[in-house]
Image (cartoon, rainbow, N blue to C red):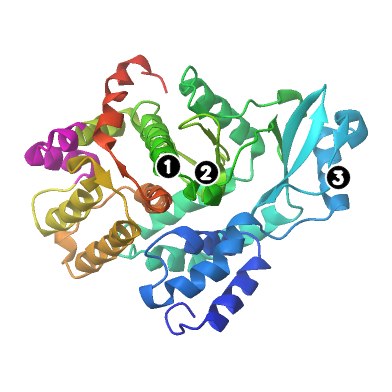
Amino acid sequence: MLLSRSGSGAAEATADALGTLRGLAAKVGQMASYVDGIVPEPQRAAYETALARLRAAAPKSSAAEIRAVVEEDLGAPIDRLFQSWDDAPVASASIGQVHRAVTEGREVAVKVQHPGVARAIESDLQNAGILEHMAGALGARRFDSKGMLAVVRKRFREELDYGLEAERLRAFRDLHAGWPLARVPAVIDERCGKRVLTTEFVRGIDFDAACAKDETARRAWAETLWRFVFRSNLVGGMFNADPHPGNYIFDPDVLGGVTFLDFGCVQPIAPVERTHARAMHRAAIARDEPAFRDGMRALIGTRPGRMDDLMFEYVRFTFRPLFESPFHMTREFAAACVGGFKEMATGARKLKDDEVTPVSPDLFFINRLQFGFYSVLARLDVRVDFAAVEKTFLDESALYPTL
């Protein structure tokens, strides 16, 4: 439907279909609603309007179903676990929904997994065709499809484990402790389980409201977002691979203040890969093309040849925000990054087998992060000195050798 029809009726039909589903279908709909370049340009306006509601709300589970999950997972009645409980969810996503509650006098957010969603996602993950189409939509069929699908399955299965997400919340909170502009909610350990995650409740404005603020506020938020994402990558050795706009709460009273939510999909970065990535970032900031290409070859593993040329052209383009800093991130540029990846993959498909260099299956989520994150920044619509932001943390890496 995306490729063959342009009218608002088709867009509404797609939104209705995806809006009644859970699992990977809901995630695809959410990605299409905000990642520039996924939906072809002639249909973009109609589909973005229709799919926008998928960013804010997925199908909701009933109050009785949610209470049953909480009581089973935490082993006690809700009225013993919480002093007060609001049956109306404050947010709903593809895997779970969030309820406001009070425990021990503290206002908390309780994320509860939808009943049956684990079975739905597992069914999707067992269907190789669905996953291959997801990868194929980004032009990735020429690469290590088996390895890529294995990584996809692992990451999405991890999203079902709220105990693991609690650990990741603590890791990101510890990494950014002492930096007042970036906030990660504290975990309430005694109210967490495998399907229930309780954190402190955070107030602020949502992404759409933030995008409507003045340029000074938007620039400060964009700087905080960039610093959080790339400091997590290059210093902490981990990144949140789901840059969904709903995962940010913006503080209207603190310039640049952002609270970061949802750490279910986190990709680790090995120390050696982090070293090569830092080299690329330093070279881009210094506008040192040869050093940048050397860093890319070391990170991706390409060798001189046509494959290396294709990869360099694409990766170099995505690093324009650093090479050309200060840089105005636009929706056209974000979409061009997605298009550039498709062109690179199309060129790779035309190569002979002995010309193709195997690349890490982890690239699937690295590109998911980049495409989504750039699209988020583009909607803030400001010019930012990204190089100056990175200079504030690039030399911190030696302080975190074990992360």
Q: CA distance from mark 3 to mark 2?
A: 25 Å
From the top left corner, tell me how far across and down residue 176 is, in percent: 47, 23
Q: Is residue 264 above or below residue 359?
A: above
Which tag is nearer the camera, tag 1 or tag 2?
A: 1
Q: Quadrant of the C terminus?
A: top left
Residue 41 in the figure: left or right of residue 308? right
Label drawn at residue 110:
none
Q: Secondary structure at mark 2?
A: loop
Q: CA distance from mark 1 to mark 2?
A: 26 Å
Per the model, the C-alpha gap separating discs 1 and 3 is: 39 Å
Instruction: Tell me how many marks there are.
Output: 3
Q: Secondary structure at mark 3?
A: helix
Which span is picked out in magenta?
Answer: 282-301
In which quadrant of the rendered view does residue 275 lie? Answer: top left
**Left or right: 245, with 107 as reference point:** left
The residue carrying pointer 2 sits among few (fewer than 14), some (14 to 19) or many (20 or more) residues within 10 Å by Cα, namely many
Say which residue label 1 marks.
Answer: 218
Res. 126 visible in picture: no
Q: Which residue is mark 2?
A: 265
What residue is drawn where x is 16% and y is 55%?
313
Camera-nearest residue between 123 and 340: 340
**Magenta highlight on residue 395:** no
Res 67 label: 3
Looking at the image, residue 52 lies above or below residue 47: above
**Disc on the earlier residue, 3 or 2:** 3
Mark 1 vs 3: CB contact within 8 A: no
| Residue 243, x across and y down, in percent | 47, 47
